Image: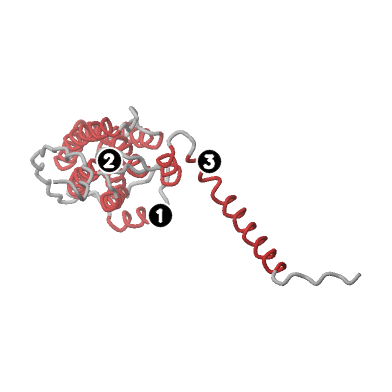
Amino acid sequence: MRPRPPVKGRGIFSGTGLIITALAATAAALLFPLWSYADRPGGTAGAQVLGARTVTTPYGPLSERDRDFVTKVRLAGLWELPAGQLALERGTTQAVRDAGQHLVDGHTSLDAHDRTVASRLGVPLPDQPNAQQRQWLATLRSARGQEFDRQFVGLLRLAHGRVFSLIADVRAGTQNSLVRDLADDANTTVLDHIKVLEATGYVDFSTLARDLAATPSPVPTPPVTDAGSAAPVAPAPSESYSLPPAASSPLPADAP
């Protein structure tokens, strides 16, 4: 009996079928993790939080960096306000005492703003300075006379210089209207404090530039300088802040 001749095209179609099956299996394997995550509580929104640590609020997206900024504003006030009070009590020059008054006034107002923003955004806030800040306060509490003046200005000017660039970065990138408004307030407050600290005459700018460029140390050592003939800066008038309105969603195309 003669063998049956092969059917033309059967091998081709069989090979194509195997390729299609393999591609389908690969696609399913790749998509399965996404589908399985979407089935969890939170669905698509949960996937967005997992990837970017960003949550939706009535005032715009709130990123992890935004929340960290709100926390850092609170921490700044928790140690800089008592540092300002120490300067009012121990400063040996009027310029140092004026700087202390600016810190007290500025952080009293900024802290109230920060706590309001944190409450609206659901961001938990600390109630005491962190370990590094407590070390800075301990350094100030143990100092007297001109040594206090030098430590006070050196520590506070360095700390304000470090946070100044952070505020600018947050202000430039945040999508949240409350965080944006808080960054504006913080920028105004920090710049005012930088100016009054510099007006004391205790800032060594070359040493400051070196310290700002270096990796932060647990307790930075302020430069030892003479007060010189510093001209105090008059306190800026206190400014009230107003919270921005909640961000509204765009209207649909067929809306009146």
Given residues 12 and 3, the one toward you in this image is: 3
Q: What residue type is disc 3 on?
A: Ser
Expressed as whole percent of the image width and height from the top left, the position of residue 20 reads: 62, 60
Specify the farthest residue to the right.
1
Q: Check disc 3: other Cα within 10 Å, few if <14, some if 14-19, many if 20+.
A: few
Residue 199 versus residue 148 in the image, above or below: below
Of marks 2 and 1, the one in the foreground = 1
Q: Check disc 1: other Cα within 10 Å, few if <14, some if 14-19, many if 20+.
A: few
Residues at discs 1 and 3 in contact (Cβ within 8 Å) = no
Relative to residue 30, is residue 242 drawn left or right? Answer: left
Residue at horizontal 72 percent and vertical 68 percent from the top: 11
Could you tell which of marks 1 and 3 lies nearer the N-terminus?
3
Q: Name the residue carrying label 3.
A: 36
Residues at discs 2 and 3 in contact (Cβ within 8 Å) = no
Query: Mark on residue 214?
Result: 1
Q: What residue type is disc 1 on?
A: Ala
Q: Check disc 2: other Cα within 10 Å, few if <14, some if 14-19, many if 20+.
A: many
Could you tell which of marks 2 and 1 lies nearer the N-terminus?
2
Residue at horizontal 15 percent and vertical 51 percent from the top: 229
Relative to residue 137, is residue 88 drawn left or right? Answer: left
Q: Name the residue carrying label 2.
A: 152
Expressed as whole percent of the image width and height from the top left, the position of residue 129 reads: 35, 32
- In three-dimensional space, the C-alpha distance between marks 2 and 3, rounded to whole angstroms, equals 56 Å
- Helix, strand or loop at label 3? It is helix
Given residues 154 and 252, the one toward you in this image is: 252
- Helix, strand or loop at label 1? It is loop
Of marks 1 and 3, the one in the foreground = 3
- In three-dimensional space, the C-alpha distance between marks 1 and 3, rounded to whole angstroms, equals 46 Å
